[in-house]
Image (spheres, rainbow, N blue to C red):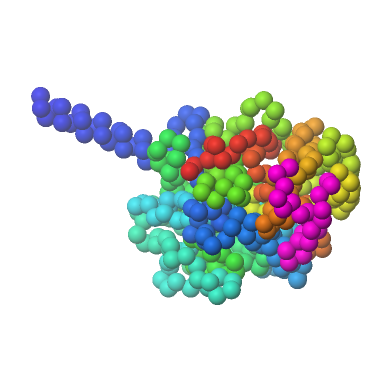
Amino acid sequence: MEATMLRALLLFSLLLAGKRCCTASGAGGFSVEFIHRDSARSPFHEPALSSHGRMLAAARRSLQAEASARSGRSASPASAPAPGDGVESKVISRSFEYLMAVNVGTPPRQMLAIADTGSDLVWFNCRNGSDSRAPAAGGASPLPAVFDPSRSSTYGLVSCQSVACESLSEASCHVVSNCQYQYSYGDGSRTIGLLSTETFSFDDGGAARRVRVSHVNFGCSTYSAGTFRSDGLVGLGGGALSLVTQLGAATPFGSKFSYCLVPFYSANSSSTLNFGARAVLSEPGAATTPLVPSAVDSYYTVALESVAVGGLAVATQRSRIIVDSGTTLTFLDPALLRPLVTELERRITLPRAQSPEQLLELCYDVSGRREWGIPDVTLVFGGGAAVTLRAENTFTMVQEGTLCLAVVSVSQGQPVSILGNVAQQNFHVGYDLEKRTVTFVAADCTHSAST
């Protein structure tokens, strides 16, 4: 009798362990931290920087990425990919603003990776004989976390003849027909390695459990160069190799995700990244717009129909715009930006100010003022989806007392319109690859974030 009781307890314990380690069943979902690189939870956090200093640094990164593209590393969206270049380098530069943790392998090795909604490949720094990773730009070394495939019982390689290998724009056959890749980004950064499969697990903050997904395709990177200062990168784009697409194919969660970005001044909070049912947005006031065809499958491109200031339409030219969490500023076509700036200048009665480092065009002196009188800006997307941006989404404090418009013009170096992450702060933004839609819901992201 006692032995039977012990066996029953052991079986019950194993079942509970299985629930913690295995992919959730049914129509549920999971949530992980979406960590801004300047937040207190990031290893790159600089405590000496004020919230204004962090914002200025983020704006600088956006414009430095645009400048590097202008210097010749990037071309227009219509350009065909050149031999040896990843297709991402032909459209927009990346400045990489958010991080997420992924547990890789069995036993799991935690990796803190860039989370990028503008690319597809998932990859991590790997140890493969010798570690040939190059230092990051500016002489900074990559973080020390390296995944060793020889220590994982679930690691596997992908063949050259696989669909996954054929999904890469730049791949070749390595020893014994294994798929070797080269993947490039808009600022010239690149990674080289072997396309592999592994078990990923995610710490679900909402339910204090671990969600486990097996046979995820990822790049085991044996060389990376450029601006990467992380353990790897998780592509959340719309292409075949992105984590979102793979979760949709391998789990009951479906190909959908969402995030809620806390404002830059909330340094002690992390944003939340949701997958599956938790990414479904059905609140009153939700504005849903369809995705439109794009030159690059990775990008979440929608149609911007018109721009209004304080309820008055100021521009109605239709243009395509990428919704991207990895770019800080918003980039608009001059045909939309010029009328917007003109109307804002007409309505805002604050004294003008100079932008630090002359980075941004329209700035005001708000020293000692509690009320700014900044009108709302409404973006109307395809399908009639109207998204109203508050002052915090259009203007940002780049130094004490100086408030600047966080919207700039597209250019030769950055030819694509982008809805950046300042414009998305305090919005729940949901992406559904099955329905091919993007949804916006105004929210208090600080209240719902992990703290």
Q: Is residue 225 magenta?
A: no
- Assess whether residue 359 is covered by the magenta stretch: yes
Above/below status of 349 relative to 73: above
Q: Residue at x 82, y 53 (%)?
A: 351
Vertical side of 79 occupied by 423: above or below: above
Residue that appears at 45% across and 56% down: 111
Q: Nearer the viewer, residue 310 or 95?
A: 310
Residue at image coords 67%, 44%: 424
Q: Residue at x 73, y 63 (%)?
A: 356
Q: Quadrant of the N terminus?
A: top left
- The picture places residue 51, in percent across and down from the top left corner, at 60, 55
344 vs 123, left or right, is right
Can residue 372 be seen here? The reply is yes
Span colored in magenta: 348-371
Q: Along the line of sight, which residue is nearer the eye, 406 or 367?
A: 367
From the top left corner, tell me how far across and down residue 371 is, in percent: 73, 42
Image-quadrant location for residue 19 = top left
Q: Of residues 436 and 157, which is closer to you in this image? A: 436
Where is residue 88? Give x, y as percent. Answer: 68, 59
Q: Is residue 131 left or right of residue 64?
A: left
Res. 322 in view: no
Whether residue 119 sits left or right of residue 338 in the image: it is: left
Q: How many marks?
A: 0
Considering the whole magenta stretch, tell me its main secondary structure: loop
**Residue that protrudes farthest toward the bottom in the picture:** 139
Q: Quadrant of residue 365?
A: bottom right
- Front position in the image: 61 or 372: 372
Residue 398 place in picture, x, y as percent:
69, 57
Looking at the image, residue 103 lies above or below residue 248? below
